[in-house]
């Protein structure tokens, strides 16, 4: 049976949209010798996906495309994750005031010559990103040029989570 990702996408999109989610990607992957059809979805308004809702979406998609999935393939519906990379302007907009991680190509002088920073995204534009960086035990506003950023992503702040318990 030939794999028809376009037909799977056509059938699955109404289900994803019904749950007010967006399809980020659909691809065939092989992980640890297992063939998978992977739908990656996201919530266009938040970074949060409820695991039970994802399971419901997966069941509804499976009901529609089960006959299109070749033997030996598995269906997976997943999110971009809690520590997703910030890529699009919308990603940055939704990450404002959120805890993030930035790694840089070169040391940042205004951040004690660090190359890895954690902090809260305060602002961004096409040239730079400004965060309230946590340096040792203090918070300092740091602006980093975009061309010096190797990676920028959301981060989980375990200390903040402990304080809220």
Image: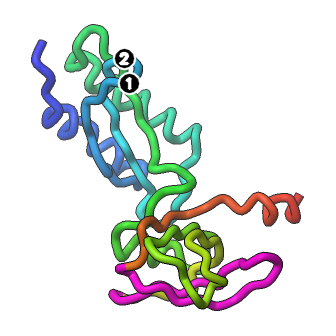
| Category of crowding for the residue at label 1, using alpha-carbon neighbours closer than 10 angstroms: few (below 14), some (14–19), many (at least 20) | few
Q: Quadrant of the N terminus?
A: top left
Q: How many marks?
A: 2
Which residue sits at x=39%, y=48%? 41
What main secondary structure does the magenta stretch of the protein show?
Answer: strand
* Residue with the mark numbered 2: 34
Q: Position of residue 160 (x, y in %)?
A: 79, 66
Q: Position of residue 135 (x, y in %)?
A: 73, 79
138 left or right of 127 in image: right
Residue shown at the point (31%, 24%) measured from the top left:
30
Q: Are marks 2 and 1 in contact (CB under 8 Å)?
A: yes
Q: Is residue 157 magenta?
A: no
Viewer-proximal residue among 19 and 50 = 50
What is the image's colouring?
rainbow
Density class for disc 2 (Cα within 10 Å; few <14, some 14-19, many ≥20) is few
Residue appearing at x 59%, y 84% in the figure? 131
* In this view, 89 is above or below 18: below
Q: Which residues are magenta?
A: 126-147
Nearest the viewer among 83 and 135 is 135
């Amino acid at each position: 049976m030939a794999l028809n990702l376009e037909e799977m996408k056509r059938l699955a999109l109404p289900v994803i949209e019904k749950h007010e989610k967006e399809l980020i990607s659909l691809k065939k992957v092989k992980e640890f010798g297992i063939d998978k059809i992977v739908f990656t979805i996201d919530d266009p308004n938040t970074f949060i996906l409820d695991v039970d809702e994802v399971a419901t979406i997966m069941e509804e998609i499976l009901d529609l495309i089960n006959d299109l999935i070749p033997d030996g393939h598995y269906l997976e519906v997943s999110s971009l994750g809690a520590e997703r990379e910030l890529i699009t302007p919308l990603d940055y907009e939704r990450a404002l005031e959120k805890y993030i991680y930035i790694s840089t190509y070169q040391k940042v002088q205004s951040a004690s010559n660090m190359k890895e920073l954690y902090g809260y995204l305060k602002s961004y534009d096409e040239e730079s990103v400004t965060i309230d960086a946590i340096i040792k035990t203090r918070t300092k506003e740091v602006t980093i040029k975009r061309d010096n950023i190797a990676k920028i992503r959301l981060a989980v702040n375990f200390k903040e989570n402990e304080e809220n318990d």
